[in-house]
Every structure is written in C-alpha cells, then in structure tokens.
Amino acid sequence: MSKILVTGGTGYIGSHTLVDLIEAGFEVISVDNYINSDAKPLESIKEITGIQVKNYAVDLCDAKALKEVFEENTDIEGIIHFAALKSVGDSVADPVLYFRNNLVGLINLIECTLKYKIKNFIFSSSCTVYGNTEELPVTESTPEQEAESPYGRTKQIGEKMLKDAFNNTNTKCIALRYFNPAGAHSSIKLGESPVNKALNLVPVITETAIGKRDGMTVFGKDYDTRDGSCIRDYIHVMDLADAHTKAVKYLLGNDQLINFDTYNLGIGNGVSVIEAINAFEKVSGQKLNYEMGDRREGDVIAIYADYSKAKNNLGWTPKYGIEDIMDTAWKWEQARSS
C-alpha cells in the first residue's frame, strides 16, 4: 500500500478523498490545522471505512512543524495538497492573508517534497485560474485571464510555482482545476460542514431550506446569461475524490512524461444559480426563500469545463449530475441538523 499525505484532510474535499483513497487500497495520513474544519470528519471516515486516519494538526506555514511530519513518515509516496483558504469574498477583503497562507504554505510543502524526495504531487487548483474567460467550455489550453480575486491569483501563482519548482527534478505534478464541488457521501455520514459561515451556493441553499438562514440572495440578475444569474459547473464531491485517486494512480504508474500537467474536472454543463435552486426545489420538495440582489465583486459570469483530457488520460468520467448533488446535499443537511 502506497502512503499518501493529504493536506486539508479534514476539510470538505479532503475528507471525501481520504475515503476514496482508503477504499482504493492506499494508506493515508492527514495534515490539517482545523482553520475551517474540525476533527469530526475523521470519526465519519472511520465509520465508513473502518480506518482511523492520523491527522497532524500542523499549519503548513510552520516550516519546522511540517518537516517533523515528514521525518516521522519517511515512506510517503505521494502528496495531495488541498489545504488553503478559499473564500473569494474574504480574499478580496484581505488579500495579504490569502497570499501568506496559501503561498507560504505551498512553498514549505514544495521544500519538503524536494528535501524528502517525494515523486508524486497533486495540487488542488481551481477554475478561477481562467478568470473571466469568453471561451466556453474551458479546456486546459484556454488562455488565462486576469484573476477575478486574490484567491484565484493564489491558484494561478501556485501552479506556476509548482511547474518551476519541479522542473528538471524527479517529482511529477498534476494540478486538478476543478469547478464547483458540492454534494455529500452516499452514506450521508460525510458532507460539507464548514466551521465558519458557509459561502458556497449549495450549503447556502440547504441551510436556507432547513431554517438556519432566514433567506438567501442570488448575487446578480443582469448578467449576459440565459436567466441573468451566474453560470457554474457543479461537480459531485465523490466524483472529485475519484479523480484525485485516479490522478495518484496515474503518477504512481509513471504514465506522466512531463513534470507538470493540468486537468479540468467538471461535469461539462453550465448550471445557472437559478437552475441550481430549481433543481434543489425539485428533489427536496421545498420552496426556497431567496431574493435577487446586486452583483458581487470577484464573481466570474460563466464558466464550465471540457473534461475530455481527464477522461482520455486518467480514465475519469463524472457519474453524478446536479440533481444527485442536491439530493445528497439536502439529506446531509437534514442529518447534521437533526
């Protein structure tokens, strides 16, 4: 069993990926300082898989503490790096915080990767690297536009840092550019449960429906889209987890010939905010209390993926659509609120 280090392992995507890795036969450890999560997902992972995952409550910006994790685990064969601050709005309000956390943490992790001769690295990137592109669907060769937020900037810079750092080394890196993760594990024991206030659309919808919020706002009603609201590509979190596992296997199999490569992960269909709300109302039978509001700074108008490269190279195809996402997200919201 190859040992994989997952940073941000108690976070939303990280915890679901730990489940998928374990079920695929990997040994895993986690590094997460609980800045936007807690230890509860580790209990859920054990319930689902029977495995107690060890987590190191280490801040990646603490270079000394991070090196101690590698000293204690000299048999790590791959790293999946999720740990980062991710709120577009917060990054606009405090860009320096995002630069320090996301980029200094990544630098420290790169240094450990090279020092301890880890050959396989998966980077949690984002569709935000494309900016406000006019080319749809987005392919990996779509030209990057100016980042719409400091968060997006950290992903653009992070990719370039990794490409430069691993050039002419024995480390191979894949940056997975994914779109909008949502949904929950089919067991409904694991889902999106941020410690801080939820900002992503799907948990905002479910929290509104269950009464944790009095209502919600759709930001923007006059975009040049079919109903005036922003368009996004929503991908089920377990489809996303599966892609990370397949990417690890691809690197471990020495199938990647270049040091750095990128892949889009999405379901390939754009869904507007209004359409997402309609999908939720359909599967849940709940009428959502929402209002139309002004545009929000940092939001891209429309973006969705062409995932054919991931299909052809990694053998990855998404299994779930927007109604599956809303169904599992709603069941998870009901379970965690009961």
Image (cartoon, grey):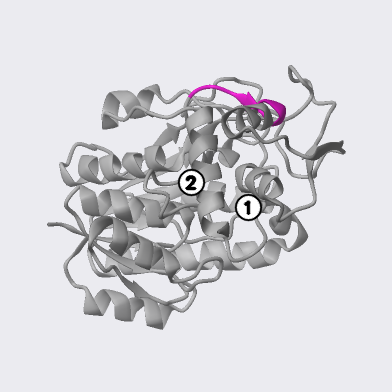
Amino acid type indicated by mark 1: Tyr
How far across and down, in percent of the image, does residue 257 sit? 23, 37
How far across and down, in percent of the image, does residue 237 sit? 44, 43
Left or right: residue 17 compared with residue 8? left
Residues packed near mark 1 inside 10 Å, few (<14), some (14 to 19) or many (20 plus): many
Is disc 1 placed on a helix, strand or loop? helix
Q: Nearer the viewer, residue 79 or 140?
A: 79
Residue 30 falls in image quadrant? bottom left
Query: Looking at this rendering, what residue extends furthest in the right direction?
Result: 294
Task: Please state, as top left, top right, bottom left or bottom right, where the N terminus lies in the image.
Answer: bottom left
Left or right: residue 88 compared with residue 234? right
Residues packed near mark 2 inside 10 Å, few (<14), some (14 to 19) or many (20 plus): many
Identify the residue shown where x is 71% and y is 52%.
211
Amino acid type indicated by mark 2: Ser
Residue 55 falls in image quadrant? bottom left
Which residues are drawn in magenta? Answer: 268-275
Q: Which residue is mark 2?
A: 125
Q: Nearer the viewer, residue 151 or 185?
A: 185
* Rendered view: 100 above or below 298: below
* Rendered view: 290 above or below 31: above
Identify the residue shown where x is 39% and y is 42%.
238
Instruction: Return the mark for residue 94.
Output: none
Identify the residue shown where x is 18% and y is 72%.
74
Residue 271 drawn in magenta: yes
Query: Looking at this rendering, what residue extends furthest in the top direction?
Result: 226
How far across and down, in percent of the image, does residue 8 sit? 44, 62
- Distance between the alpha carbons at the discs numbered 2 and 1: 11 Å
Q: Which residue is mark 1?
A: 151
